[in-house]
Amino acid sequence: MLWKRLSYHHKLFIVLIIASSLPVLLLGTIAYKKSSETLMQQTEQDLQIIAGQLITAIEKQVSDFDRFSILPYYMPEAFTIFNQPYVPQEEWGSAELNAQKQLIRLMSAYPSINKSIKGMVFYGMNESISGYRLSGSSTMNKNYDVSEEKWYQEALEKNGGFVVSGVHDVKQFEGEIFKAVTVSRLLLDEQMRPLAVIAIHISPDFIERIITSSQLRDTVVTVVDADNQLVYASDEQLAAHLLEHPLESGADGTWVADSSLEQRNVKYSGVVRVNKYLGWTIYMGKNQTDILQGTSKIRQYTVVIAIVLMFASAAVSWLLANGLAGPIRRLIRSMRNVETGRFEILEVPNRYDEIGQLHLSYVRMVKRLNELIHSIAEKERQKRKAELYALRVRIQPHFLYNTLNSIRMLAILQQSPQIAKLIHSLNRLLQSYLKLNDELMPLSREIELLQDYEKLMDLRYTNTFEVKWDIPDSLADAGIPAMLLQPVLENSIFHASRGLSRILMIIVRARLLEDGRTLCIEIMDDGTGITEEQIENLLQERREDDCANIGINNVNDRIRLWFGQEYGLTLRRLEPGTAVIVTIPYKPVRKEI
């Protein structure tokens, strides 16, 4: 890692620069974020007010069209044609012609009332159609089926209620198709029977005129209808993004979106207002760069101050580092001399700061190291002397082993096979004791040693106990430390038989746990048993006067030294008797030949 390779001088230099610059950058960043948030909130509040005023103006204009749609009720003679059965145009008489003239006079008056009206059509329930178009042909397109239009269906459903559509193509007239917002209403007679649907087609330009008259500078406006269809957009790319990601229906809120402007991405933030009367949604927003233009100075000042402080802290840190690095370099040179075995004592500097204390502690440490090295040399000499003594001591078990072999051969010659077998068993046990620090032995070999020990104990406690062996052949090669189970069996024979008037039954069983990695060896007896307090004392305390305690703890310690703390020895009460459970990892080993 590069940081670890840097010298103390450079590390201190870097840390001081960061320590002096970071607070300034942090405070500047916080101030910039807070001012940005305040500006954004203020802008959102202003846009909410403007959007409310704008949607109110649009609603007022549309409400005028709402009033226009009920004007036929004040001129009932103009649409008496809808009260009569449908008569084809080629069969019209004077009554039909007069009614048609009255209707045309009514329709032609509408554009003079409002210049945004581009045309209107009456759809009679008697299947008659009459219409007027301000520019272009007013001839009706007979192949056009108005019943498929959503606004027409809504007008019928509302049964006299006012309906406003989004921008759509008007195909009712022959000639060029034009776009319009259609307001419609079902006209009813005095008996509340449907007569006709009046449809007034309005140019969407009236929205642009309202927005232009509001003098909204650097503000984008998008208007969509209830079906999320575009009605008006000052930025078509932004409008396309908003249409792809609409807000929840009927909810006011804020929005953030990206748009391309002159081959660069521009981020906009704004508000959303929904008008329930029209079912339209207005998105109004501004360029975030324009909104946050006032906060850019805070960011610039922060950067300038940070740069100035970095240079100032660089100069100060350089001076401090030089003052601190000199004594440390001298300490490093002295340490290298100590590494080579030259314990040269430095002069104690005349300073009382941390560097001076470090120097003084180092001098004391060098003196102490010199003393320890001489002490270690003396201990090594004593250790070699102790090893020679240990070699002499180890000769004694071998001498005993050889002597027992001689006695065994003599017993065979004297025709005492029982004594020979017992001495042979004792020899094997003694040989195993000599291997306590060697590698693991197979479980089958450990069981043979236990059986030898059983024979010796049977000689001592005749007809006192009986041992049953339940060792699967599949576990014969399981590795186990030498003579691990002998203290446990000895403990069962010696303690469990106390006070019994019958033969003590001992079972030695081995099995593999479900995980397939743990060997479990159980030594169970039906003897006098053990209390919970005794179990706790056996596993937690060491008393030199209690041989059973020493043996059990010795087994537990050996297991944990060999295999780790997750393995060991546990005791469990039985009814009657006691169970000693030994768990070690299952590790097959090669059998001895």
Image (tube, rainbow, N blue to C red):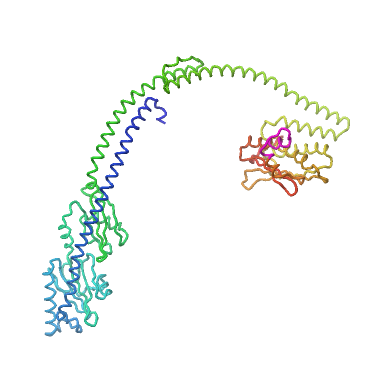
Whether the magenta-drawn stretch holds residue 547 is answered as: yes
Residue extent of the magenta highlight = 537-553
* Residue 64 visible in image: yes
Secondary structure of the magenta portion, mostly? helix
Q: Is residue 323 left or right of residue 471?
A: left
x and y percent of residue 433 in the render? 73, 31
Going 74% across and 39% down the picture, which residue do you hit? 491
Q: Quadrant of residue 157?
A: bottom left
x and y percent of residue 527 in the render? 77, 45
> In the figure, 167 relative to 542: above or below?
below
Total labels drawn:
0
Q: Nearer the viewer, residue 459 or 375?
A: 375
Whether the magenta-drawn stretch holds residue 456 is answered as: no
Q: Is residue 413 left or right of residue 151?
A: right
x and y percent of residue 425 in the render? 79, 34
* Residue 445 visible in image: no
x and y percent of residue 81 in the render? 17, 81
Q: Nearer the viewer, residue 42 or 102?
A: 42
Figure quadrant of the C terminus: top right
Q: Nearer the viewer, residue 291 or 561?
A: 291
Figure quadrant of the N terminus: top left
Question: Residue pushed farthest front?
Answer: 352
